[in-house]
Image (cartoon, grey):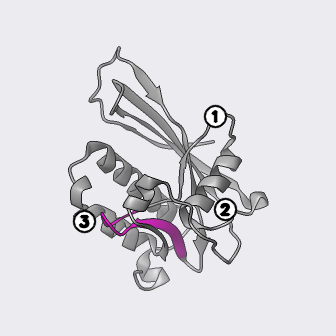
Amino acid sequence: MRLLFEIDTKDYAENGTVGMRPSVRGIIIKNGRIAMIYSRKNDYYEFPGGGMEPGENHSDTLIREVREESGLRVIRDSIREYGYVHRVQKGKYEDIFIQDNYYYLCDTEDQAGEQQLDDWEDEEQFVLIYVTPDHAVEVNRNHHHGEKQDNRHFQVMLDREIRVLEQLIREGMIGAEDICGGGR
């Protein structure tokens, strides 16, 4: 899979303890809009997805995480590689946190089922919203994000999602807001 870009904050001790947690995220595009998970509590967008469980492959993680966070059912045969983001920064619990975030283009069944949010996701008040990429970028870049505003891990995640959205636009995978029309 191609490397989209790297994020290395260089804020960690070079020879410290290392924690790794790969994640898989879905890029779901319908009618010129992209499926994003929106936090009603802290006003931000992220791609549906999450961390891999032991023994899971990328497709299984993608299908499980998208279903849990959004209620959407990924069609397995539609899954196509897009790229990954390599992230290195000071960890919360370890000296160095390394995460490869794998992004896959995929289609889903039309009807969404019920979300199966964990406690943290429920507290964030996650909901599925189809938005134009420009709207998600504008919210993530310019809105205040409540209690998360000054969290360095959160800011790196926002930067990652903004850059992936902008790359999708540059590569013609999805149009900018003026092409798609409207925000949310």
Q: Nearer the viewer, residue 104 or 57?
A: 57
| Residue denoted by label 2 | 106
Residue 70 is left or right of residue 16, and the answer is right
Q: Secondary structure at mark 1?
A: loop
| Residue denoted by label 1 | 54
| Residue drawn at (55%, 78%) of the image | 32
| Residue drawn at (26%, 54%) of the image | 148
Q: Secondary structure at mark 2?
A: loop
Where residue 5 sits in the image (x, y, percent)?
A: 46, 43
| Residue denoted by label 3 | 142
Q: Could you classify mark 2 by the number of other residues whose Cα lies within 10 Å: few (under 14), some (14-19), or many (20 or more)? A: many
Marks 1 and 3, how far apart in space?
37 Å
Q: Looking at this rendering, what residue extends furthest in the top direction?
A: 15
Amino acid carrying mark 3 in the image: Asn
Q: Main secondary structure of the magenta part?
A: strand
The mark nearer the N terminus, 2 or 3, is: 2
